[in-house]
Amino acid sequence: MACKTVLVTGCSSGIGLAVAVRLAKDELKRFKVVATMRDLDRRGPLEQAAGSALNRTLEIKELDACSEDSIRSCVDSIPSRQVDILVNNAGVGMIGPLECQSIGAMQRLFDTNFFGLARLVREVLPDMKRRQDGHIVVMSSVMGIQGLLFNDVYSASKFAVEGFCESLAVQALKFNIRMSLIEPGPVITEFEKKVYEEADGMDLAGTDEETARIFRQVYLPYSRKIFAALGQTPEEIAEQTFQVITADSPPFRLQTNRLYTPLTTLKHADPSGRLPLDAFFKMVFKHDRVFSASLGFLRLLRGRGAKKAC
């Protein structure tokens, strides 16, 4: 593989940082990484993680996915505007009762999670078409496949991402352009930590008492248990993304967490949609002890798997 230019967004922390560093430290030196972030004042952790790769196989640039001018300026600064691989990772989260979310906040989330992707692809796609080559890698989520309680708006943005990519992928193939959706489940990052910290202090005055109780006493404790049992590290996601990028025939979809797969397969098991809804309802509201015990078992399996890997 000749040295390829990879543009990665959202690299100030978490998955984006880990992906950029993993590609820049490729033993075969196959990649020149342009690691971008909206606020360059937050570049410190990336510089530290990049180490000797900084300004060699990795350079840091400013890019705001919500600004067409910022995206164009960043791409124009790349020699010949040649982006061989785009890794779209920039995103924001939102959890909580729908009644407590403003329409403005929902629009801002979509502006980053969906329209940010659309802006980036619009900028690099024409050049990829002319070269008859390229790979667009999009950080999606299992919540782009299966909706989750109190993640209504975030899940909707990821559903939009999935539909956008699935539609565009057919046209892209005509121009020898690959598209890949990376679909993590729970990932333990500063991104997730911030979302849950905001949820803990969320003003629930806009909803009814029962919904507020379910959010505080059921959803938040369950979420923490799920992260403890199933959560992956950014480095695990980065390694799987690296394998997709270097594959001779990269997959269109990759769910990164096999322990989470049974939950997403429920949707495809019953075309009527009743099975997954009924299963999730019972897990949350009727069989919570069984659910907690299952998570404990999965945590045990994950621990054993980690020991074998060592």
Image (cartoon, helix red, strand yellow):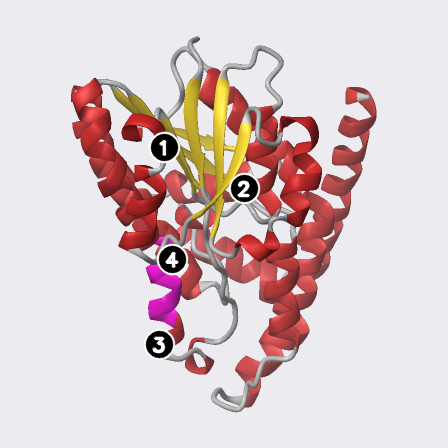
Image quarter of residue 219? bottom right
Q: Is residue 172 above or below residue 106?
A: above
How many numbered discs?
Answer: 4
> In the depicted view, which residue is nearer to us: 275 or 248?
248
Q: Which residue is mark 3?
A: 104
Q: Which residues are magenta?
A: 106-114
Q: Position of residue 74 (x, y in %)?
A: 36, 43
Crowd class of label 2 (few under 14; some 14 to 19; many from 20; radius 10 Å): many
Q: Is residue 246 above or below residue 200?
A: above
Q: Earlier in the sequence, mark 4 or mark 2?
A: 2
Q: Earlier in the sequence, mark 4 or mark 1?
A: 1
Q: Which residue is mark 1?
A: 78
Nearer mark to the viewer, of 3 and 2:
2
Q: Which residue is mark 2?
A: 16
Image quarter of residue 102? bottom left
Nearer mark to the viewer, of 2 and 1:
1
Q: Is residue 193 left or right of residue 267?
A: right
**Circle on res. 112:** 4
Q: Position of residue 284 (x, y in %)?
A: 59, 62
Per the image, label 3 sits on a secondary structure element best described as helix
Structural distance between the alpha carbons of marks 2 and 1: 19 Å
Secondary structure mostly seen in the magenta stretch:
helix
Q: Position of residue 229 (x, y in %)?
A: 72, 46
Q: Say which amino acid is labelled 1.
A: Ile
